[in-house]
Image: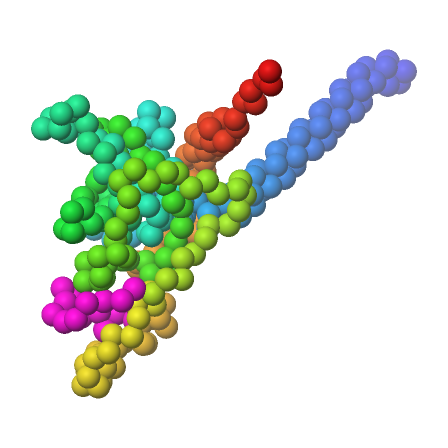
Amino acid sequence: MFSIISKCRPLTQFSDVSKTLIALSSQSTAVLKEKSLREKDVLKKQIPECRHVYPEFLPDPKVEFRNVIREKLERSDMVARRTQIDIGEFYVGSVLAVTSSDRHAPGKTHRFVGICIQREGCGLRASFILRNVVDHQGVEILYHMYDPTIHKVEVLRLEKRLDDKLLYLRDALPEYSTFDLNMDVEILPEGAPIPVNPIKVKLKLRPWLERWERQNLMGVQDLELPERFYIRAKERETPWEKYDLMKEYMRTIPEEEQLEIFSGVQNELHKLESQRKKMKRKRIFIKPSKLA
């Protein structure tokens, strides 16, 4: 009887050790789960900002153009390109200066300053259009954001406009699209919200390139058209589309997929953003000179 009890003692000790190990492992898994949930919550809060700052990282919502492997490869190429060139935060309405290679230019490089009137595309096909009036002539250049011939992208004035596209500047007065080619950088305080320019543009008289009265533009003054134009525009309106949930779903990327996309590139983008802020602080700081 005593021998059986003595043999069973190691088993009880082993069971106690195993229980403690199981408890520790369960606690560690619980801590890891809590940490992952916390990171997901932080990333969910950052998704709206990333969606507006880096819209080209989101894929095309059209199903026929989707390819998961190609999208991942493109995102890695985009991050690698951003490590070579500083592409700052900008929106439609911001004033940029782009320096690119040009074999016909005297110094083999060309610098163009203009206002961003359109930003579209996704992945490596992302592009934007800059517009300026040079010698009383409207000039527009379309740049592919990740084009290897681009040397530098400078954000001279960071701001937004009331509309998502400013293509109506083509039919506006020249002063709304005229910017100094030697314009200096306007620095915003760190952490300040992006300013929204409430200016309303005055368009020229018809004919126009598009039917602007049918596009519900907020950044345009009264078009001063006859009543029949507004009646026709009212007939062409489709106000029910904003309630079409299926159509809205088909032209957007779900939040779960956005979370998966930005979780893969968030660390690299955060490092690049912190480096850009450090360089910005160095430019702002002016070393005081010694007094005689």
Residue drawn at (22%, 48%) of the image: 132
- Say which quarter of the image contains residue 5: top right
Residue numbers of the magenta segment:
201-217
Question: Residue 91 location in percent, x, y?
Answer: 36, 49
Q: Where's the N terminus, which quadrant?
A: top right
Q: Residue furthest right?
A: 2
Number of numbered discs overlaid on the protein picture: 0
Whether 175 is among the magenta residues is no
- Say which quarter of the image contains residue 76: top left
Residue 206 to residue 257: above or below: below
Whether 207 is among the magenta residues is yes
Front residue of 232/182: it is 182
Magenta-colored segment: predominant secondary structure? loop
Front residue of 235/19: it is 235
Front residue of 173/252: it is 173
Left or right, residue 247 beside residue 289? left
Residue 100 to residue 60: above or below: above
Residue drawn at (24%, 78%) of the image: 224
Residue drawn at (22%, 61%) of the image: 173
Question: Residue 254 location in percent, x, y?
Answer: 39, 53
Left or right, residue 16 beside residue 219? right
- Say which quarter of the image contains residue 6: top right
Question: Residue 292 location in percent, x, y?
Answer: 60, 15
Left or right, residue 41 beside residue 60? right
Q: Residue furthest front?
A: 292
Residue 289 to residue 192: above or below: above
Residue 118 shows in this picture: no
Question: Residue 204 location in percent, x, y?
Answer: 19, 67
Residue 288 shows in this picture: yes
* Color encoding of the figure: rainbow
Left or right, residue 252 beside residue 170? right
Residue drawn at (53%, 40%) of the image: 190
